[in-house]
Image: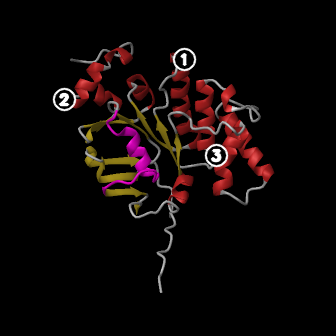
């Protein structure tokens, strides 16, 4: 007789601010001959905004996707509130994704659905017993939170890039997650919209008390939104520190990255050579 392994249930106990919430431990990941991570280690504390910087193709987005089960690490562990997610199956991650939501780079909205239907989608998945009235109220609440009240009947095709980002955020926070993952949130946006998105990231931390992990190569955004910044290079995290520490870092990989992008943030502060 075959016995099916019981489905793990995420036992979430919201930690106090400053306590460790997520840990990537000795992570390894390859795609064919290309090795992305080699003994990557990183810790995220509750209530902080941690930004992961690095060049294109360095694996920043891969890190987020491993956390929510869209990709699997080849070795190592990912701990969420001290629970090992390594052996979770696809269906096991459904509960994880209620607590950890992702705002995708392209917003990933369903074009065939209205804005309201897009935001309601995760509610139907995670809270099937929620009444239609409660769902409408939750959708309206989240749209107001991202400063887009009353656009439930609009279609994604009618939205600007910045509006799509905000609707993507409203959908991500519909389930009241404890963690928000931001995948290149300012890519392709004009400076005014970029600043608006940066302020929104900080606002979510203050209003919802959530933990955020942001991946970007936009250093002005990184310095604006971050409590800490982690540099991903050469398949590992080479330095983690407060923005002030990273500005004056002497770690070669960090220094080279900042020097290459100095024009993005020089108006804020001249970086020491």
Q: Is residue 74 magenta?
A: yes
Residue 125 left/right relative to 133: left
* Residue 252: assigned label: 2
Q: Residue furthest front?
A: 32
Answer above or below: position of 154 versus 102. Answer: above
- Looking at the image, is mark 2 or mark 3 earlier in the sequence? 3
Label 2 Cα neighbours within 10 Å, binned few <14 / some 14-19 / many ≥20: few
Indicate the position of residue 76 as horizontal and vertical percent values: 30, 57
Residue hosting label 3: 174
Label 1 element class: helix
Check contact, mark 2 vs mark 1: CB within 8 A: no
Q: Residue furthest right?
A: 133
Indicate the position of residue 230 as horizontal and vertical percent values: 33, 37
Q: Nearer the viewer, residue 246 or 73?
A: 73
Label 3 Cα neighbours within 10 Å, binned few <14 / some 14-19 / many ≥20: many
Q: Residue at x 73, y 60 (%)?
A: 129
- Looking at the image, is mark 2 or mark 1 earlier in the sequence? 1
Residue hosting label 1: 192
- Looking at the image, is mark 1 or mark 3 earlier in the sequence? 3
Label 1 Cα neighbours within 10 Å, binned few <14 / some 14-19 / many ≥20: few
């Amino acid at each position: 007789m075959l016995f099916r392994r019981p489905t793990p249930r995420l036992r979430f106990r919201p930690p106090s601010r400053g306590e460790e919430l997520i840990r990537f431990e000795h992570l390894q990941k390859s795609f064919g001959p290309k090795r992305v991570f080699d003994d990557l280690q990183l810790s995220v504390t509750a209530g902080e905004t941690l930004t992961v910087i690095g060049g294109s193709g360095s694996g920043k987005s891969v890190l987020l996707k491993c956390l929510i089960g869209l990709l699997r690490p080849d070795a190592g562990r990912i701990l969420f509130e001290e629970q090992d997610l390594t052996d979770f199956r696809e269906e096991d991650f459904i509960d994880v994704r209620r607590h950890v939501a992702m705002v995708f780079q392209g917003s990933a909205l369903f074009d065939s659905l209205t804005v309201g239907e897009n935001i309601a989608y995760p509610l139907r998945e995670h809270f099937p017993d929620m009444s239609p009235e409660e769902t409408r109220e939750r959708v309206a609440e989240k749209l107001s939170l991202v400063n887009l009240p009353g656009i439930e009947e609009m279609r994604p095709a009618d939205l600007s890039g910045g509006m799509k980002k905000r609707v993507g955020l409203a959908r991500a926070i519909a389930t009241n997650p404890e963690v928000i993952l931001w995948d290149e949130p300012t890519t392709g946006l004009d400076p005014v919209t970029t600043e608006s998105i940066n302020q929104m990231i900080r606002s979510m931390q203050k209003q919802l008390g959530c933990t955020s992990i942001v991946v970007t190569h936009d250093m002005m955004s990184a310095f604006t939104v971050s409590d800490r910044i982690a540099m991903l290079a050469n398949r590992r995290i080479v330095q983690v520190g407060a923005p002030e520490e990273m500005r004056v870092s002497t770690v070669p990989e960090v220094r080279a990255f900042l020097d290459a992008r100095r024009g993005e943030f020089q108006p804020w502060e001249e970086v020491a050579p």
